[in-house]
């Protein structure tokens, strides 16, 4: 049996990424059988293991790939500096976390790893390092323009029509054509990824989903026509529903997505329900990519308090999606 290769980036070294990665991998019995390949820096991992009182046998990927891969190996990402700052954003940490991702994506595009799980990065650190992208999904979208940001949990699933852009810009993007294309693309990706049928509930933009034009015209002018266009193509999509009730309609409905029109509309209810268990899944890539739904947590970095559950769930889901895709 050939085991899948799962890539894991360390994320921002100043945050909780290295900590949660090591905590998850130290409990290997709870993880799916796979070859786990880290993308990071040996010095940072050794420092983190010492701080946590953990020891993992992490071999060099360059040496390990010549023989049957071990449970865990490391792709060492070179850096021009040796020290990193814990608990805050910095240029150095931004450069490191970006290069971890860059190297991992390169191997994923080559098919060397089948799934990629990314620990949290800091957008501020990336900005300080003059990285031109605002996060993982933005970077992935530069290579794969049809990438879609979604969030999965047992209780709720959300797809974001727009994500890391100013709210004013997000509102300008809500057009019939763009939203109809998004619904169709989301549906296509879910059909490609899983065999189950899915339905999609579109959130309105305005209070009460516009209240027949009394509280805004976007629903009648753009959103409803987009939904009708998608329905004519056989897609199970409904709405728009009032934003303050649509998430209740999707609760505990395993094959139902809420399509949120902007970042906070979708992420506030999602993180309220599943902060420690939620998973960020990027659709539209030639490989599986998942991530915890939380950030770098600079306030507790280096204190050994970080909860690794979301990362563990991200690894398990990536493995399940890969198996499902292989069976199609």
Image (tube, grey):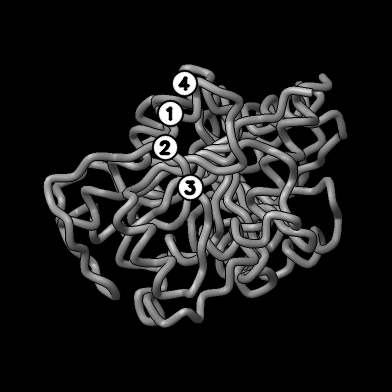
In this rendering, is residue 89 above or below 178? below
Q: Which secondary structure lies at badge 2?
A: strand
Which numbered tag is attached to residue 63? 1
In this rendering, is residue 123 above or below 142? below
Badge 3 density bin: few <14, some 14–19, many ≥20, Cα 10 Å: some
Residue 141 location, x and y as percent?
41, 32
Q: Which secondary structure lies at badge 4?
A: helix
Residue 169 location, x and y as percent?
34, 49
Q: CA distance from mark 2 to mark 4?
A: 21 Å
Q: CA distance from mark 4 to mark 1?
A: 21 Å
Give the residue displayed 79% in from the left and 23% down from the top. 1
Q: State which tag comes first along the sequence, 3 or 1.
A: 3
Q: State which tag comes first along the sequence, 2 or 4.
A: 2
Q: State which tag comes first along the sequence, 4 or 1.
A: 1
Residue 208 location, x and y as percent?
66, 66
Q: CA distance from mark 2 to mark 3?
A: 7 Å
- Evaluate if marks 4 and 1 touch, with contact meaning CB atoms under 8 Å apart: no
Q: CA distance from mark 2 to mark 1?
A: 5 Å
Q: Confirm whether residue 239 shows in the render.
A: no
């Amino acid at each position: 049996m050939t085991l899948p290769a799962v890539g894991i980036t360390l994320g921002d070294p100043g945050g909780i990424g290295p900590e949660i990665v090591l905590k998850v991998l130290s409990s290997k019995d709870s993880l799916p059988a796979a070859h786990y390949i880290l993308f990071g820096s040996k010095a940072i991992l050794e420092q983190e293991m010492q701080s946590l009182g953990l020891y993992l046998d992490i071999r060099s990927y360059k040496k390990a790939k010549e023989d049957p891969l071990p449970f865990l190996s490391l792709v060492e990402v070179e850096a021009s500096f040796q020290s990193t700052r814990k608990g805050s954003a910095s240029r150095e940490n931004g450069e490191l976390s970006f290069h971890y991702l860059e190297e991992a994506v390169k191997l994923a595009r080559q098919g060397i790893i089948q799934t990629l799980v990314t620990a949290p990065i800091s957008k501020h650190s990336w900005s300080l390092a003059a990285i031109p992208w605002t996060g993982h999904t933005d970077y992935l979208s530069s290579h794969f323009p049809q990438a879609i940001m979604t969030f999965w949990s047992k209780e709720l699933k959300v797809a974001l029509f727009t994500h890391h852009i100013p709210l004013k810009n997000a509102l300008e993007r809500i057009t019939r054509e763009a939203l109809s294309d998004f619904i169709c693309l989301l549906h296509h990706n879910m059909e490609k990824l899983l065999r189950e049928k899915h339905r999609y509930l579109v959130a309105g933009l305005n209070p009460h989903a516009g209240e027949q034009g009394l509280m805004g015209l976007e629903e009648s002018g753009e959103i409803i026509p987009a939904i009708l266009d998608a329905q004519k193509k056989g897609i199970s999509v409904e709405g728009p529903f009032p934003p303050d009730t649509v998430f209740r309609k999707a609760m505990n409905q395993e094959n139902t997505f809420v399509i949120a029109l902007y970042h906070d509309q979708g992420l506030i209810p999602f993180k309220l329900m599943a902060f420690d268990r939620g998973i960020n899944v990027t659709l539209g890539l030639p490989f599986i990519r998942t991530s915890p739904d939380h950030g770098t947590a600079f306030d507790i970095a280096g204190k050994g308090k970080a909860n690794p559950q979301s990362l563990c769930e991200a690894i398990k889901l990536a493995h399940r999606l890969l198996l499902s895709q292989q069976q199609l």
